[in-house]
Image (spheres, rainbow, N blue to C red):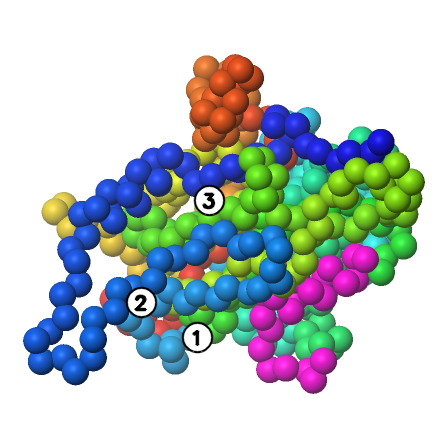
Amino acid sequence: MFKFSRSVLQRSRVDVPQVDVIARQLHTRLSPRRIPRKDSHKPFQPRPQRKNAISPLKTLCWTRRYSSPSVLHQNFTYGVAAAYSGKSNTFDRKRHYQDLEAPSTDEHTPAQRNVGMLRVPSGQDAYFIGNVGKTQSVAFGIADGVGGYADQGIDSAAFAHGLCAYMGKAAHNFPDGFKGKPDTLSPLSLLKRGYSNVCADKSISGGGSTACLAVAGPEGILDVANLGDSGFIQLRLNAVHYYSNPQTHAFNTPFQLSRLPPKILAQIEDFGGSAPFSDMPADASLSSHQLRHADVLVFATDGVWDNLTSQEILDQVSSSMIRTRAWLTPDFCGVQVSEKLPELTTSRLPTKTENGSQSLQAILATDITAKAKAASVNPKRDGPFAKAVQQAYPGERFAGGKVDDICVVVAIALDESMPKL
């Protein structure tokens, strides 16, 4: 009888890091209760509790908007870069990254880029970054292939790499291929388009993947669609402004897009058993965020979240931003944004490697990837995944980091209307 399952040690990202959970609980306990004004004509209504999980039995989209005081007519641009490392590969800072501004001469189709030497060496993780048609928006995202399909002789990386390749191609050709040729591109419609193309691609026999993608527009609005246990974090001047929550069916079992091959369906029909989880793009958690100048966005697969907490990512980003003089720390004035920030995202800066030079966003992406890689192979330091396993399965005696594929996309928001000092 065929039964699809994943080992506790194969997948990850069970919950929000414990530090974040404790901080949220303290905030709830210490927050003052809202008291209605005596002259108010409306009865007091407490704010409804936030729903972090989506029921797998319903096909619903929850949309949340997190805004800050800002002017929507601002002219935002974005510095975007990606870094990656397969779990069986040594991370090379000089080669395993890509900048959005890097010229592309790739004329291959998504199906061709998904095989052989054309696929980036990121293991079962994949990413895409690119401009949205002729608009001023940018689209980027990551995907993490489900490793359990390898037990059935299926290339577990093909689905994730194909999904990102098709989403990147659809964003580049926007609005061609979209019904009605809309003026703006939403991450949900992009995810639906990529998923339908993967399912129609005969070169991809089956597989599954999580996905976390975004579209950032010139007005400073970031729209995000997140399905599964990949996720993102929004940093603002040495502080965690927002982080996403994972979607899971059970321990170590995230929401996932999938394509079930005929062989598995036939086995289930003949011998019974449970089918692999197969969620739809409409099950993704949707959110919208108003950005500010110098906000740093980090999108990553669970190879990062299983080994680093939100605080550790913030510490690494802060260290890199201060080292490159993108953030300034004058005496008694806290952290300030350097007026040279736009220049740093387009120029080439010295890196930690000998004779290396990268943009600021590429430095951040490679620094986070290197830190997660080092933590994943450290047997003496228990990361978030190890602590979650110890709590849920004490008999496993899992300790140290969790070796996994790693993929990171970093975007820096730049408000071109900021006054020059």
**Mark 3 neighbour class, 10 Å CA radius: few under 14, some 14 to 19, many 20 or more:** many
Q: Tell me the amino acid under the disc marked 3.
A: Leu
Q: Does 392 sit above or below residue 321?
A: above
Kindly identify which residue carries mark 2: 68
Q: Circles 1 and 3: CB distance less than 8 Å?
A: no
Q: Is residue 88 magenta?
A: no
User: The C terminus is located in which quarter?
Assistant: bottom left
For this rendering, which residue is in front, 403 or 122?
403
Q: On residue 15, which mark appears?
A: none
2 vs 1, front mark: 2
Residue 406 shows in this picture? no
Q: Tell me the amino acid under the disc marked 2.
A: Ser
What is the distance, in whole Å, between disc 2 and disc 3 at their CAs?
Answer: 25 Å
| Residue drawn at 68 percent across, 32 percent down | 6
Q: In this view, does 275 lie to the left or right of 242?
A: right
Q: Is mark 1 on a helix, strand or loop?
A: loop
| Residue drawn at 79 percent across, 51 percent down | 259
What is the distance, in whole Å, between disc 1 and disc 3 at their CAs?
Answer: 24 Å
Q: Circles 2 and 1: CB distance less than 8 Å?
A: no
Q: Is mark 2 on a helix, strand or loop?
A: loop
For this rendering, which residue is in front, 408 or 187?
187
2 vs 3, front mark: 2
| Residue drawn at 62 percent across, 55 percent down | 57
Q: Does 109 sit above or below residue 326?
A: below
Residue 185 point in image, percent of width and height? 60, 73
**Mark 2 neighbour class, 10 Å CA radius: few under 14, some 14 to 19, many 20 or more:** few
